[in-house]
Image (cartoon, rainbow, N blue to C red):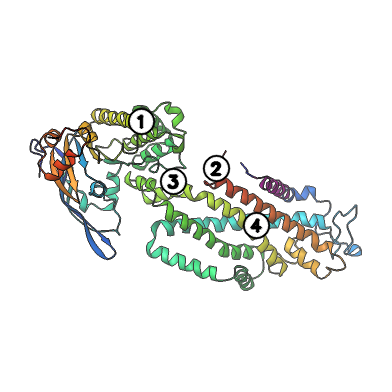
Amino acid sequence: MFRNKLSYVGAVILCLFVLSALLAPWLAPCDPYAISLSEQLARPSAAHLLGQDGNGADILSRLLYGGRISFAVGVTVVFFSGGIGVFLGLLSGYHGGLLDMILMRVVDILLAFPGLLLAIALVAVLGPNMSNVVLALTVMGWVSFARLVRGQVLSVKERDYIQAARTSGQSDLRIMLAHVLPNVLSPVIVQATFSVAGVIVAEASLSFLGLGAPPGTPSWGAMLSEGKQVLLEAPHVSIFPGLAIMLVVLSINFLGDGLRDHFDPRVSRT
Amino acid sequence: MSPSNHAPVDSLLEVRNLSVAFEVNGREIPILQDVSFSLASRQTLGIVGESGSGKSVTALSLLKLIRRPPLLTMSGEILYRGKDLVELPSGEMRAIRGKEIAFIFQEPMTALNPVLTIGDQITEMIRAHERAGKKDARMRALQLLMEVGMSAPQMRMKSYPHELSGGMRQRAMIAMAISCNPSILIADEPTTALDVTIQAQILDLFRKLKDERRMSMLFITHDLGVIAEIADEVLVMHEGSVKEYAGVEDLFLAPKHPYTQKLLSLLPGRLPT
C-alpha cells in the first residue's frame, strides 16, 4: 500500500505512539500526578528514565498520559471539522448558487484570520478548558475541508456518471451521497491525516500559552511550557515533550505523504 | 410531419413543435426548432445527424435534463402516454427518468461511476425507483447481467468499471438502463465508442431486449449503417431542425430532402445513383 519506506516508518512510529498512549495506565512506571518535591528537576536515571519535572513528577509517565490528550484532541477535532467541512462542501459544491456564495464567503472570512490567533481569541473568550480547545480548533478546521470538498465536487458533478445518475431518476441526496461523496473521499482522507498533525501542534501551542489543559494536566504543550523557565538548568524537562510532538507530527506527515501518493491516480499503481 | 407510411395511432411518445433555446454570453441561441415526431410502442426511431445537429439535446430535453443556464426557454409538447412532460413538476419528472424512460450514454467508461462496483450501481438504480430490499435488488442485478450476456456475471457484480472492457461496460450500462423495466430506451450513440465487432454484438443485444421486453427505442447516431440495421423510422436532423422524417426504407430508397440525399451520397461503398 505504501510506496515509500518513509511512510512505512511514519506509520510504525505513529502506531507505537498511539499504542503507548492507549496503554498509558499499564505502561507508565509512575503516577503522572505524583509530586516529589525533593526530586525537582532530577536528571534521567534508572528509576525515572526521562527524568523528573519541576514538581518532581516522572516525565516519561506524564508523556505517556499526555499522548492521550494530544491524540484525543487531534482525532476529535478532525472528526468534527472533517464531518462539518465535508457536509458543507458537498452542499456548497453540488447546489451552487446563493448557498455556495454565502458559505464560501464565510470560509474566506475564516481563512483571513491567522488560524491560531482565532483559536486563541475563542478560547480566551470562552474560557480555557479542553472542550473549548476542541471547539475552537473545530471552528478553525472545517474551512479547509469545506474548500477542498467543494472544489472536488465542482469537478466531479460535471462527470458523465453524475449526469447518468440524474438521467436514471435518482434524487439529489442520493446522487450526493452515493455517487459524489465516494469520488471526493480520497483527498479528504489525506487532508484529514495532515490535519491531525496540525491539530496536535495547535493544541500543544494553546497549552503552551496556558489556554489548553488546566495547570498540572500532563499535556505535551503544557509540559513544554513548564520546562521553558528552567531550560538552561534542566533542558530534559522540555526536550522530551518537544521530541514527542516532533516525532508524532513528522510520522503523521510521512504517513500522509504515502497516502497521497497512494490515492493519486497519476502515480501508477502496481 | 409524420412518416408517410405509418400513422401513429398507438403512439407512446409524441413530441410536438419542441423548441429549445440556450443563453450563451447573454445572447439567445436557438438550439432546436419545431422538432416533432412520434414513437409508437415497440418501435425504434433513429435520430441521425452530424455533430451539433441537436440529436443529443433532443434526447436530453425529453427527460428535461438540460440545466439552466444554459437552457433559456423550452416550448412545445412532449406527450408521454398523454401526459405533457414539459409541464410536469420535477418530482414527478424524476419518477419517469430511468423508470419509464431510460437513457444510455455514448461513453460507457465515463458514464459509470469509477468508485462503485457494477453490482452496486445497478442495485442503486433499482432501489432509486422501487422499494426493493438490498438482497432482492442484488439478485435482480445479477439476473440483468445474465440477460445482457455478461460473461461470468457473478464475478462482474464485484468488478469496478476500469476492470471491464468497453463492450462489457456498455453491457453493464444497458443492464442498468433496463433494470426498472422502462417502456422507452433512449440510446445516445451507444455503439460509437466500440469497435465494429462489439458494435454488432451490442446492436443484436438491443434488438433482442427490445423484442423480449416490448420496449420502444430512440436510437441516436451519426452512423447511417447503424440506422439501417436497427431503426423502423428515421428522423434526419440538421442545425437543430428536422430535415426529413420517414420510414427507414423510404429514407434509404427515396430520400426527399436534399440534405438527406447528400448525406446518403457520402456513404462509403454506395454506388452513385
Residue A199, horizontal then vertical, whole percent: 64, 60
For the residues labelled 2 and 3, the Cα–Cα distance comes to: 26 Å
Q: Looking at this rendering, what residue extends furthest in the right direction? A: A38
Circle 4: element type: helix
For the residues labelled 2 and 3, say whether their Cβ atoms are less than 8 Å apart. no
Which quarter of the figure is the C terminus of chain B placed in? top left
How many residues crowd around disc 2 within 10 Å: few (fewer than 14), some, or many (20 or more)?
Answer: few
* Above or below, comparing residue B45 to residue A133 in the picture: above
Q: Which residues are magenta?
A: A4-18
The residue at which mark 3 appears reads as: A178
For the residues labelled 2 and 4, say whether their Cβ atoms are less than 8 Å apart. no
Which three-letter amino acid code belongs to the residue tagged 1? Leu
**What is the chain identity of the residue bearing mark 3?**
A
Which three-letter amino acid code belongs to the residue tagged 2? Ser
The residue at which mark 2 appears reads as: A268
Q: Looking at this rendering, what residue extends furthest in the front direction? A: B272
Which of the 4 image quadrants contains residue B137?
Answer: top left
**What is the chain identity of the residue bearing mark 1?**
B
Instruction: Looking at the picture, tell me which residue is in the foreground, B90 or A159.
Output: A159
For the residues labelled 3 and 1, the Cα–Cα distance comes to: 21 Å
The verdict on a common chain for dots 1 and 4 is no
For the residues labelled 2 and 4, the Cα–Cα distance comes to: 27 Å
Which of pointers 4 and 3 lies earlier in the amino acid sequence?
3
Instruction: Looking at the picture, tell me which residue is in the foreground, A5 or A48.
Output: A5
**What is the chain identity of the residue bearing mark 2?**
A
Residue B236, horizontal then vertical, whole percent: 17, 43
Residue B166, horizontal then vertical, whole percent: 39, 35
